[in-house]
């Protein structure tokens, strides 16, 4: 026999099954309505939100600049990738890239443009303005800087070490993950074809043929290296949060500190064809005499004093990427002009 308790359970179960098969209507009373549609889904998902741009706070950072063999200038910003005519400033094209946060660029020997983003490498063919390769296996997808060595290989600095990529075959050739100082913040190839790497704890010189470490330099004021450039006489110029320093390109010995740059946070370094040194900092762009370290001038009227990237001798101009947009400096007058398509200024 069926007990009273079992009879109640069967009755309730049958009622629920019958209700599941009936259409649900919204209540017409003043109570809370019942909807047949599922609840709204949060877009993007919480795990994806760190990679989404805030539409209320447009980011005008220009983190990378690269001229190409056609004479164009590629502008990598946190708004994406654009190609402009540096003589007129006209935008020639925009390339839809998988990650808009571009902080490094390089041109390989056959003219392809490589982008370093928050999510790995992207290769763009300037002849067709299209992506031809992307998403390489790196020590980390956070690319900080890139350099082409004397053999044409692409060296990629990430926040978890170094990688060497074959630009032609698009293959990862080797990695150096046990890098002293861990993060490969800045890269430069010296006159002997070896790679200098600026890390969180100083300098590392790497043999580009074997990927072996040749020597290390520590105890640099500011420790963390933010910018490197090879000077016309073979010295290695290094920028840190505490100033600008010059090292011997073979031994790594500290030759001198640039007195007038002491205490300035140097973010990028570049030499033009006249051997003039340009140093971008968090508080302005400076033109220096590389032989005595004297500051020749400071460039006014940039979109922001916080300089992120430099490209020299592009259509007789120095191009400057800042945290608030793009500008170019006349190499004859020294005056800065803002590119209004890449700036937060009206």
Image (tube, helix red, strand yellow):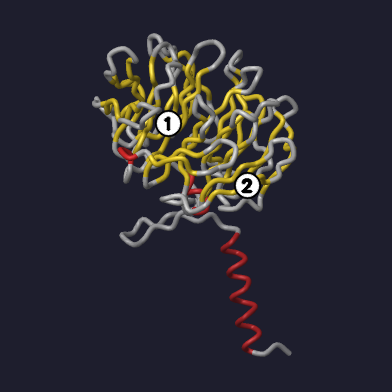
Q: Please name the residue shown 65% across and 30% down the image.
A: 193
Dividing the picture into quadrants, the one containing residue 257 is top left
The quadrant of the picture occupied by the C terminus is top left
Which residue, given by chain and number where applicable, does mark 2 sit on? Answer: 215
Front residue of 235 and 225: 235
Q: Marks 1 and 2: which is nearer the front?
A: 2
Graded by Cα atoms within 10 Å as few (under 14), some (14 to 19) or many (20 or more), the crowding at tag 2 reads: some
x, y percentage for residue 76?
47, 28
Q: Is residue 205 left or right of residue 118?
A: right
Pointer 1 with pointer 2, Cβ within 8 A: no
Front residue of 13 and 313: 313
Comes first in the chain, label 1 or label 2: 2
Q: How many marks?
A: 2
Which residue, given by chain and number where applicable, does mark 1 sit on? Answer: 309
Secondary structure under tag 2 reads: strand
Q: Is residue 20 left or right of residue 260?
A: right
What distance separates the C-alpha of mark 1 from that of mark 2? 28 Å
x, y percentage for residue 239?
43, 40
Secondary structure under tag 1 reads: strand
Q: Is residue 163 left or right of residue 224?
A: right
The quadrant of the picture occupied by the N terminus is bottom right
Position of residue 297 relative to residue 240, above or below, is: above
**In this orientation, does residue 43 appear?**
no
Dividing the picture into quadrants, the one containing residue 6 is bottom right
Front residue of 233 and 19: 233
Q: Which mark is residue 211?
A: none
**In this orientation, does residue 201 appear?**
yes
x, y percentage for residue 60?
36, 33
Q: Is residue 173 left or right of residue 276?
A: right
x, y percentage for residue 312?
43, 20
Q: Please name the residue shown 58% across and 16% down the image.
A: 126
Front residue of 161 and 273: 273
């Amino acid at each position: 026999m069926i007990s009273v308790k079992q009879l109640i359970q069967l009755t309730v179960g049958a009622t629920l099954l019958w209700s599941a098969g009936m259409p649900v209507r919204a209540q017409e009373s003043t109570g809370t309505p019942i909807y047949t549609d599922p609840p709204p889904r949060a877009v993007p998902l919480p795990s994806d939100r760190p990679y989404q741009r805030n539409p209320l706070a447009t980011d005008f950072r220009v983190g990378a600049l690269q001229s190409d063999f056609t004479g164009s200038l590629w502008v990598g910003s946190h708004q994406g990738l654009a190609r402009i005519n540096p003589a007129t400033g006209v935008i020639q094209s925009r390339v839809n890239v998988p990650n808009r946060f571009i902080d490094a660029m390089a041109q390989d020997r056959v003219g392809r443009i490589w982008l370093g983003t928050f999510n790995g490498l992207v290769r763009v063919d300037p002849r067709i303005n299209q992506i031809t390769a992307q998403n390489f296996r790196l020590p980390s997808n956070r690319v900080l800087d890139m350099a082409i060595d004397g053999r044409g290989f692409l060296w990629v600095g990430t926040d978890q070490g170094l990688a060497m990529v074959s630009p032609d075959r698009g293959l990862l050739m080797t990695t150096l993950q046990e890098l002293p100082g861990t993060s490969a913040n800045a890269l430069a190839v010296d006159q002997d074809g070896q790679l200098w790497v600026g890390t969180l704890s100083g300098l590392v010189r790497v043999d580009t043929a074997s990927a072996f470490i040749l020597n290390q330099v520590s105890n640099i004021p500011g420790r963390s290296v933010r910018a490197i450039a090879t000077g016309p006489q073979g010295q290695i110029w290094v920028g840190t949060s505490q100033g600008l320093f010059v090292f011997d390109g073979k031994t790594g010995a500290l030759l001198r500190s640039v007195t007038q740059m002491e205490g300035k946070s140097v973010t990028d370094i570049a030499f033009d064809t006249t051997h003039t040194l340009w140093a971008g900092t968090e508080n302005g762009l400076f033109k220096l005499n590389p032989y005595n370290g004297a500051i020749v001038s400071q460039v006014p009227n940039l979109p922001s004093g916080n300089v992120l990237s430099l490209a020299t001798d592009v259509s007789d101009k120095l191009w400057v990427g800042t945290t608030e947009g793009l500008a170019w400096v006349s190499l004859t007058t020294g005056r800065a002009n803002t590119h209004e398509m890449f700036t937060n200024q009206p």
